[in-house]
Image (cartoon, rainbow, N blue to C red):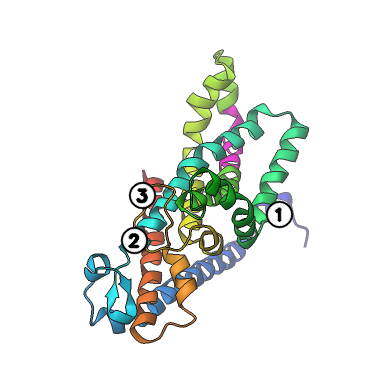
């Protein structure tokens, strides 16, 4: 049988149906894994949730599971402060890096710069934590003791999520149709006017998706934050105060936790999962808009 170019470009309906079912199966597996994780966290948390009201997890006097105190609020605030501060710094830096690579840097320099950003994205988190512990924390300690603090956590998280923001923003910028750029240039607009008035609005969805993805990583990061934040369960009044995040709390206490203490750690994991679901819901709402 001789295949025409039309047969190659437009495969038969049976092939389309097969691909459609494969995609449905893949998406179903992904959704099933998320539901299994949620079910597992909820099942492990239920023994404690049946005895302790949800309000107590933010109103108890302290975090002392052995004494029946389960206040997660200081660790929740530490998680949100660290992730929020990192996003505040990484978002403009990442977008600026993407704009530099896409529209300002000469091609050789842009290629090298992009490779460096990709290299940063591939460095293990424990390496970031080790570097921050031996270099960044002593520098902050000279400025304002103790060096292990919320500020150290924000700075190391900024460095870790910056590649995610930059690479996703760069991909979104490259996806802007060339016709938009030619039309804007034909109107006599300057380079920055084109970027501000045409490129950034057209790439807004991709850039926002990258920021939300980076936020998810910042919220769930464990090892690097555990190594540099001091791990003190308290509400931070300044950026120089030590904190403990929810993820770090689970990593520190799970090896020896038993009974209600173990269940309380699973409640911490459930709270983290709900934060990620909230981010996903925000991304879905932005996508619909």
> In the orientation shown, which residue stands out farthest toward the bottom?
259
Estimate the spatial distance between the alpha carbons at disc 1 and disc 3, rounded to whole Å.
38 Å
Label 1: state its secondary structure. Answer: helix
Q: Tag 2: Cα neighbours inside 10 Å, few (<14), some, or many (≥20)?
A: many
Estimate the spatial distance between the alpha carbons at disc 2 and disc 1, rounded to whole Å.
60 Å
x then y, percent, for residue 223: 55, 64
Q: Which residue is mark 2?
A: 74
> Mark 3 or 2, which is nearer the eye?
2
Rendered image quadrant of residue 233: bottom left
x then y, percent, for residue 72: 32, 66
x then y, percent, for residue 197: 48, 24
Q: Say which mark, if any, is on residue 244.
A: none
What is the chief secondary structure element of the magenta stretch? helix
> In which quadrant is the C terminus drawn?
top left
Vertical order, 187 against 247 (above or below)? above
Magenta residues, as a range?
A: 169-179
Q: Which residue is mark 1?
A: 8
Is 173 included in the stretch rendered in magenta?
A: yes
Q: Tag 3: Cα neighbours inside 10 Å, few (<14), some, or many (≥20)?
A: few
> In which quadrant is the N terminus drawn?
bottom right
Label 2: state its secondary structure. Answer: helix
Is 22 included in the stretch rendered in magenta?
A: no
x then y, percent, for residue 166: 58, 42
């Amino acid at each position: 049988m001789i295949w025409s170019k039309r047969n190659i470009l437009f495969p038969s309906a049976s092939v389309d149906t097969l691909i459609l079912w494969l995609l449905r199966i893949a998406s179903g597996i992904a959704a099933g894994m998320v539901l299994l994780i949620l079910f597992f966290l909820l099942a492990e948390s239920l023994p404690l949730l049946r005895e302790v009201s949800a309000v107590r997890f933010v109103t108890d006097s302290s975090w002392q599971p052995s004494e029946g105190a389960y206040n997660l609020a200081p660790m929740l605030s530490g998680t949100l402060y660290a992730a929020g501060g990192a996003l505040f710094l990484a978002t403009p830096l990442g977008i600026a890096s993407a704009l530099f690579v896409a529209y300002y840097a000469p091609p050789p320099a842009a290629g090298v710069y992009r490779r460096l950003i990709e290299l940063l994205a591939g460095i293990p988190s424990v390496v970031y934590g080790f570097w921050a512990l031996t270099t960044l924390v002593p520098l902050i300690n000279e400025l304002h003791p103790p060096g292990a603090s919320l500020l150290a956590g924000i700075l190391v998280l900024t460095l870790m999520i910056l590649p995610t923001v930059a690479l996703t923003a760069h991909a979104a910028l490259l996806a802007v149709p060339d016709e938009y750029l030619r039309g804007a240039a034909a109107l006599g607009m300057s380079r920055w006017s084109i970027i501000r008035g045409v490129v950034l609005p057209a790439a807004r969805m991709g850039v926002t998706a990258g920021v939300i993805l980076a936020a998810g990583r910042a919220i769930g990061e464990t090892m690097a934050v555990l190594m540099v934040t001091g791990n003190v369960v308290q509400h931070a009044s300044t950026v120089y105060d030590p904190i403990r995040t929810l993820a770090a709390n689970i990593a520190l206490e799970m090896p020896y936790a038993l009974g209600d203490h173990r269940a309380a750690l699973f409640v911490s994991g459930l709270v983290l999962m709900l934060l990620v679901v909230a981010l996903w819901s925000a991304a879905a709402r932005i996508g619909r808009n």
